[in-house]
Image: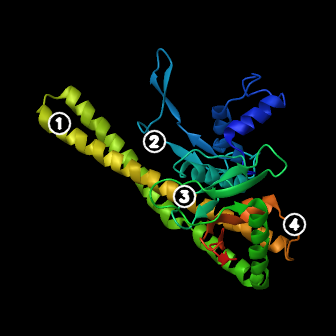
Amino acid sequence: MSGKTMTAIAKQLTDDGIPTPCGKDTWGSRTVESILTNEKYRGDARLQKKFTVDFIQRRMKVNEGEVPQYYVENSHEAIIDPLLFDRVQEEIARRKALGRSYSGKSIFSSRLICGDCGHYLGSKVWNSTNKYRRVIWQCNNKFKGECKCDTPHLTEETIKAKFLEAYGQLLPDRERLIEDCRLMQTELTDCSDIDREKKDLMQELEIVMELIQRCVDENSRVAQDQEEYLARYNGLVARYEKAQARIKELEKERSERMAKADAIGGFMFRLQELDQPLEHFDERLWLEVIDHVTVHRDGELTFRFQNGTEIQV
């Protein structure tokens, strides 16, 4: 949550001499990812991730929808704060949705958006070999294509100063914003309709699985028209896959809603905690309260906070 990539985390663990779960000296990004996305750390369990395809040879297969999976919440004591775990899942999803590789070299990476073309701003080093060296941020698409973006480059000092100014403008209306956040959280976390539909679909899966099994058993016992059998079998499979796809959509929607509620909660907490204008830039505050920043051609910046509030400075 401090902005590092999984590769950078793996390198740090390796450099610190911390062994992997298998006792090896070198960490890989996939190992880090498997830990960060393992629901067991937040106290939950997903059952039937794998299933046995050959009992004699004890051969297992990753469950890709062949049999139902079950998600059990609060099955054991968590060792990671569930809210923090969910925020990490949201951040992983945000990075994957960028459409390009994520750079964790700076807290500003993938947060600054060009108001002209919609591309992200990237860091560039000017005068890298002399005393006038400095890092600036400009649109990655600025000099590509026929139309050049007119958005200016920004120094990190400018971004930080404008962020402090924008955050300061939130404080006079702090109590109303906090109350709005509570209402938004209540609405987002009310997933009763989603849970009800998912429960119905899980029952549907069990029924269809039983019908498929009966269909196969009947075909093995009684001679019948194979075209009719296949039509009936394929119809049941299609019904199963449709219900399964809908369950995945519901799980994704629920996860996104809970992650958004957690992000708003973090924003609300920081707004309650910091009730005075800041004198110095706070990296943690930036990462917790900013969704993205749009850079305009006149040099103005629009800061969009996690609760949806936008302030232009």
Please tell me which of labels 1 and 2 falls first in the chain: 2
Q: Residue at x 79, y 50 (%)?
A: 133
Choose mark 4 or mark 3, whichever is in front.
Answer: 3
Mark 3 and mark 1 lie on one chain; the one further toward the N terminus is 3
Mark 4 and 1 residues: CB-CB less than 8 Å, in contact?
no
Say the numbered circle drawn on residue 68: 2
The 10 Å Cα crowd at callout 2, few under 14, some 14 to 19, many 20 or more, is some
SS class of the residue under badge 2?
A: loop
Look at discs 4 and 1 and give the one toward the viewer: 4
Of marks 4 and 3, which one's residue comes earlier in the chain?
3
Q: Residue at x 72, y 28 (%)?
A: 27
Q: Quick check: 225 above or below 42?
A: above
Residue bearing the label numbered 1: 229
Image position of 263 (left or right of 23): left
Q: Position of residue 87 (x, y in %)?
A: 67, 55
Q: Choose mark 3 or mark 1, whichever is in front.
A: 3
Image mark count: 4
Residue 158: image quadrant is bottom right
Number of other residues with Cα within 10 Å of mark 1, as a class: few under 14, some 14 to 19, many 20 or more: some
Residue of label 4: 280
Between 208 and 259, the one nearer to me in the picture: 259
Locate residue 269, reporting x and y percent.
Answer: 78, 69
Near-viewer residue (260 or 302): 302
Q: Which residue is mark 3?
A: 119
Quote the CA–CA distance across marks 1 and 2.
24 Å
